[in-house]
Image (cartoon, rainbow, N blue to C red):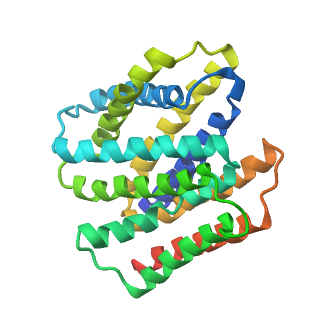
Amino acid sequence: MFDTPRGKAALFMILAALFLSIVPVFVKLIPADSGIPTTQKLFMRGVIATIVLAIVLRARGISFRPGSPVLLGARSLFGIAGMLTYFIAVEGMPLAEAVTINKLSPFFVLILSWLFLSEKLKKIQVFAVFLGFAGVAVILRPGSIPLTLPAGLAVLSALFAGSAYTTLRALRKTDRPLLVVFWFSIAITLFFLPSVILGGVMPDLESLVFLVCIGISGTAGQLLMTKAYRCAPGGEVAIYGYLSVLFSMSWQILIFDSVPDATVFIGAGLILLGGWINYRSRG
């Protein structure tokens, strides 16, 4: 199965979903009393990715010069906002809920691409978007429980991520995927460096290991995702990214000994169904 380009793309995307689902696990494993701010976790994520990607680009002989600095800047700003809100959401709510809500980002891509890139939106895709937002409504249960700040930030993280992915659609014409991730990593590092200098803390050994693991797993996930999109069209492999929802539910049960509520399973099912319908609609 994995000896064809499509099979390799599927394998790379599944592994990418696995590594990216581990990132929020390490974020939550850092003790709250460690004093390590969210900005320091994001800084470490950026530093490790920058070093690894610089080595990869150098080895492949790819120029570090960006093709479209303006679009790269917009992608970086949206990406930084998305990661910051996502990390804060992960710290303040159950893992499976935060990751599942964040998976609204592809639906925001559909809406934003329709609004700003004049891409056509099929009726079946409108239905898929409806299912995605219905799934989040089931998880958050507005009206029956108070909406918390982390829950709102989880939705915002999906919106910012969707905005970043929308700019990527335009960047396909000017910059290679690895170069986009490299400059995004530099932007993260530089953006959070002042905060780390002024308010960072020296982590203990355990927290330092978790910080490094955030960077390694996030970078591995980005590289594997890039390889997946090089092996097959995005529409054929994006569906496998939704496996991160299932992985996150497993981590919540196995590592944090917490079984998600039935509403989380129902909401996740609706979001996964919406993602599958959107995937099939591209055929």
Q: Residue at x 29, y 42 (%)?
A: 180
Q: Residue furthest bottom?
A: 123
Q: Quadrant of residue 135?
A: bottom right
Asked if residue 269 lies left or right of residue 164, the reply is right
Asked if residue 199 lies left or right of residue 168, the reply is right
Quadrant placement of the N terminus: bottom right
Q: Relative to 89, does residue 65 appear above or below in the rendering?
A: above
Q: Quadrant of residue 181?
A: top left
Residue 164, percent from left and from top: 35, 52
Q: Quadrant of residue 60?
A: top left
Residue 221, percent from left and from top: 50, 43
Q: Residue at x 51, y 65 (%)?
A: 239
Numbered disc total: 0
Q: In this view of the protein, can residue 3 be seen by the observer?
A: no
Residue 92, percent from left and from top: 66, 43
In depth, the one of 83 and 66 nearer the eye is 83
Q: Relative to 123, does residue 77 appear above or below in the rendering?
A: above
Q: Residue at x 40, y 58 (%)?
A: 162
Quadrant placement of the C terminus: bottom left
In depth, the one of 90 and 169 nearer the eye is 90
Q: In this view of the protein, can residue 51 be seen by the observer?
A: yes
Asked if residue 127 lies left or right of residue 116, the reply is right
Q: Relative to 189, does residue 255 appear above or below in the rendering?
A: below
Asked if residue 65 lies left or right of residue 20, the reply is left
Q: Relative to 42, does residue 81 appear above or below in the rendering?
A: below
Residue 236, percent from left and from top: 43, 67
Q: Residue at x 18, y 41 (%)?
A: 69
